[in-house]
Amino acid sequence: TFWVATADAEAFKITQGKVTRLKVPVYETPFFGSSPLSFLSIVQHANGFTSFESTKGIHIVENDRLVHVQQKYTQVPAQSRTISSLKSSQSSWWLGTDSGVFKIIPNGTLKQFAKANGFTNTSVTCMLEDTERNLWFGTNGNGLYQLSTEAISLYDQVEEIDLSNIESTAKTSDGSLI
């Protein structure tokens, strides 16, 4: 299966030469009327589902239509904007939002990581899993977090470098973090 998102706010699934147009939601805004999605990326997850990241959050493909993640997982606060996502090697799906991070395990159970359990309530802008299966979360204003099996660690300054606002993370070809 091949997935396509266009600049005209359309999404398609192409399977064995057959093109299927996905039903894409249109959002109403108070000042501008209807507002189409502007797609940022498409992610094919290991367990077979596909998500489209857009300016209106993350949408999951279900029955040839895009469903906003907060319609499927109602525990994610409605006012939270989903900014980033990651599929971990343990098959959990992580959502970075304006309200911290949400972990969705394969059976659909959702757990929030926020200030109450040592994390942040600020925007999580990016996520990465390293070769040791530690998860790294970049935030807007609160540093870089590392989640290991043992603990949550915060890196907000390293060798006099301010790490409070993280926009993106990456790994090198040998798996080291950049």
Image (cartoon, rainbow, N blue to C red):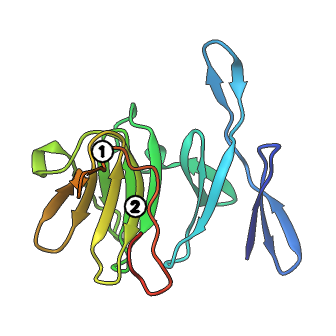
Q: Which of 178 and 111 lies nearest the eye of the viewer?
A: 178
Q: Which secondary structure, mark 1? A: loop
**How many other residues sit within 10 Å of disc 1, few (<14), some (14-19) or many (≥20)?**
some
Please state which amino acid type lies under the numbered disc 1: Ser
Report which quarter residue 159 is drawn in: bottom left
Q: Amino acid at mark 2?
A: Met
Picture quadrant of residue 24: top right
Q: Position of residue 96 (x, y in %)?
A: 38, 51
Q: What residue is drawn where x is 36% and y is 39%?
A: 98
Q: Residue at x 33, y 58 (%)?
A: 137
Residue named by callout 2: 127
Residue for badge 1: 164
> Viewed as shown, does residue 54 lie left or right of 15?
left
**Residue 50, position as x, y percentages in the image:** 59, 66
Left or right of residue 177, residue 3 in this image = right
- The residue shown at (39%, 50%) is 166
The quarter of the image holding the N terminus is bottom right
Q: Position of 71 compared to 50: left or right?
A: left
What is the quadrant of the C terminus in the image? bottom left
The label on residue 86 is: none
> Mark 2 vs mark 1: which is more N-terminal?
2
Neighbour tally class for label 2: few under 14, some 14-19, many 20 plus, Cα within 10 Å: many
Q: Residue at 45% across / 74% down in the picture?
A: 171
Marks 2/1: CA–CA distance: 15 Å
- Is residue 79 in sight in this rendering? yes
Question: In this rendering, which labeled residue sits more in front, label 2 or label 1?
Answer: 1
